[in-house]
Image (spheres, grey):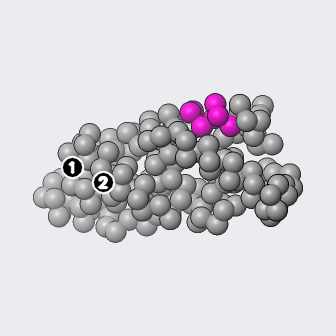
Amino acid sequence: MFSDTQAAIIYAYRKVGRQQIAASPVRPAPAESSRGLPDGQFVALVILGQIGQIGHGRHFLDARYSRNSNQSREIVRDWLFDRMRRDRWFLDDVLRRWGGAKPAHDFRWWATHLSRDYSTIFRWKHRATDYLDLQLIRAESEIDNRLRGAGIVGD
């Protein structure tokens, strides 16, 4: 049905009406009319149901692919704060930028606000992004196994 997991995830977020950020070519799913749902919505709900079962990783997927998940963004921001011990709102801006949303401030503003050199702010941003990317890869790997098992993603 889908050639890769990312395409399936993007399709699911797009199909249920959540505002999608990272656009990617998606192979359309076949028409589904299970339980009287519109075409493809059943598949999207199955995918989101699988995402909901992967534990903490679902918050990283929500933060990356959905703008409507403030709760997930807060959870991810707090997780990131526990690892980095940097300003929470700076980390929130990094997280927004990572998810494709507009940050509240640019990095020059943060350098001035935190009384740090721009290169320090930039290094913190890269470190935070590395943490986020690693967790996203873990979450996508876990959901990949589930979606392949369900026959939604195939080679």
Three-letter residue code for mark 1? Arg
Position of 23 relative to 55 (above/below): below
Q: Residue furthest left?
A: 115
Q: Nearer the viewer, residue 44 or 155?
A: 44
- Looking at the image, is 26 positioned above or below residue 155? below
Residue 150 location (% of width, % of height):
73, 36
Q: In this image, 122 relative to 22: left or right?
A: left
Circle on res. 10: none
Mark 2 Cα within 10 Å, few/some/many (few <14, many 20+)? many
Task: Classify residue 32 by image quadrant.
Answer: bottom right
Asked if the residues shown at circle 1 and circle 2 are in contact, with their CB atoms under 8 angstroms apart, the answer is: yes
Is residue 133 visible to the viewer in this orientation of the structure?
Answer: no
The residue carrying pointer 1 sits among few (fewer than 14), some (14 to 19) or many (20 or more) residues within 10 Å by Cα, namely some
Which residue sits at x=34%, y=60%?
93
Q: Amino acid at mark 2?
A: Leu
Residue sitting at x 15%, y 54% = 116
Say left or right for 12 vs 65. Answer: right
> Is residue 4 magenta-colored?
no
Question: Which residue in the protein does label 2 denote?
Answer: 91
Q: Which residues are magenta?
A: 141-147
The quarter of the picture where the C terminus appears is top right
Instruction: Give the quarter of the image for residue 145.
Output: top right
SS class, disc 2 = helix
Tell me if residue 1 can be seen.
yes
Q: Residue 61, image x and y in percent?
A: 52, 48
